[in-house]
Image (spheres, grey):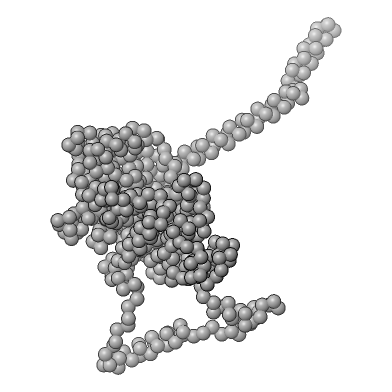
Amino acid sequence: MEMILFVQITILQLALCSTVPTISNRADLNNTIIKTELTNVTTENRTQNEAKALKKVYLSNRTITCNDGSQSGFYLRRSHLSKKWIVFLEGGWYCYDHPSCQNRWVKQRHYMTSSQWPETRDVGGILSPNQEENPFWWNANHVFIPYCTSDSWSGTRIERNEGGMFNFMGSLIVQQVIRDLIPLGLENSTDVLLAGSSAGGTGVMLNLDLIQEILHDKMGLKHIAVRGVSDSGWFLDRIPFSTGGKLNMSAIEKGMDIWRGNIPDACKIEHPNEPWKCYFGYKLYPTLKAPLFLFQWLFDEAQMDADNVGAPVTKQQWDYIHKMGNAIRKSFKNVSAVFAPSCISHSVLTKRDWLQVKIDGVSIAEALHCWETIPIRKYNHNNNMKRSRNHHHKEPKIVPRQVKRIDNEETRKIRRRKHRGNRKPKIKKNRKNCGIKLKCHQLKHQQQSNFSPFDHNRSERSAHHNQKQHQRRPSHCHHRRLEKCSWPQCNRSCPKLHNPYTGEEMDFIELLKSFGLDMESVAHALGIDMQTLISMDHTELLNLLTQQAS
């Protein structure tokens, strides 16, 4: 009996010892637990990212395809928190005849087929679900339509072209996407923002009124407000810098024929003999009915490419580019809502750093949101264009005397309001804020000093104040933001330029020298010596140049 008991105790001890980990076993166990937790976190993050990702959806009408006949579609991220929808058209230039389309098929096939489309897409900027990156539309319903038709979203050619390889159905894809989105929740929406960059920006202008017609007239969804935002899709038909280059308008004219391009009827009526001109924003814009917001770099790289000017390193190139910027600026005279920084770049809406682009302290996102808050019933496209032609200022009409006598009380009210608006601030209110080190007359001088567009602290305060005003009175938003300075890259928020030969970031003085400028003459014109100019801070120099330019 004692022997049996001893054996049982021994077996129990061995069993207990085998379950208690040694020091090395404990370390292995801890590592296993940590790896398991990290795996769980990684899996959880991957699941969250997948939930936030734009998911691929093919069109219900499978006869509407990409260039090569592959199935077309879109990427969708639904939001149950918002009734706003953003439908984005991807950019990517175009091809206009058999050789250019064949070359595109060899070098840029992803713009002509859906065969390599992933199941999900992650797009930044205005389509980002991250609130810090996209503060105004992070929770909207997001739709991204990949570009696979090479026709600036205008084509209606179902059959193959003469070469027998490609069809062009860009406009048909846009229309079908809208129809497919209706049962997915679009019918219950309040706002649709049709957006696009580059060729997609041109596609926005070409399809905006058509989408409004489909939703309002054909579908009876008149409660949906339709707006558009065109990013870097506003091109000019200029004579190219290089004589060997092909004229931009010639390519568009050829392209419209093989695409069987669908352009707005109103623009077609304006240009019956040259309908291809409707691909240029400054010709198309005056005929649009739906509201459009325009973003355009004054020195757009795609325009420079179309003009065959190349990477600017010589004085001749800079002279041409400077004239190009002036021409683009002048083409905005009829545009009621525009944001145009003086930078050399291309597209912005889906870039991760899009909030960094500012004019006078106001970002493109803030300006676009401010414009979007105005009810469309208050938006009158023709009246806005008239105000734009007159630079937003009209001389007050002389009121006849008999009308003055009739409206005498109203006239007095207007006079009183103007008098209140012209009152100078009382210095007494500010004396209590005068410190020992800051005398009151210095504070008064600061209050009367001129505003500098590069004074960030003051600009940010002004932008914050204006944002509150916009929330209360959105109709008072300032929609025309054109860079005051005409120098390329004079805006501090411009994307950095790099020397095309060395790849290094260009210093501002080096950039000015590449313009072909004699820096001693610049110093003399600014009223400073050469040493001061060379050692001057970038911000100070920009301020001086801006003041000289204005």
Near-viewer residue (242 or 468): 242
- Give the residue at x 51% y 37%: 46
Near-viewer residue (351 or 529): 529
- Give the residue at x 46% y 56%: 514
User: Residue furthest toward the right?
Assistant: 2
Q: Quadrant of residue 339?
A: bottom left
- Give the residue at x 52% y 72%: 527
**Left or right side of 92 for 8:** right
The vertical placement of 545 against 189, above or below, is below
Give x and y (percent) for residue 33.
65, 30
Where is the N terminus found, in terms of image quarters? top right
Q: Quadrant of residue 314?
A: bottom left
Q: Quadrant of residue 239?
A: bottom left
**Left or right side of 366 for 261:** left
Total labels drawn: 0
- Give the residue at x 21% y 52%: 276
Give x and y (percent) for residue 24.
74, 23
**Left or right side of 166 for 436:** right
Give x and y (percent) for residue 174.
28, 46
Near-viewer residue (267 or 16): 267
Q: Is residue 208 visible?
A: no
Give x and y (percent) for residue 413.
39, 87
**Left or right side of 505 for 296:** left
The vertical placement of 547 against 3, above or below, is below
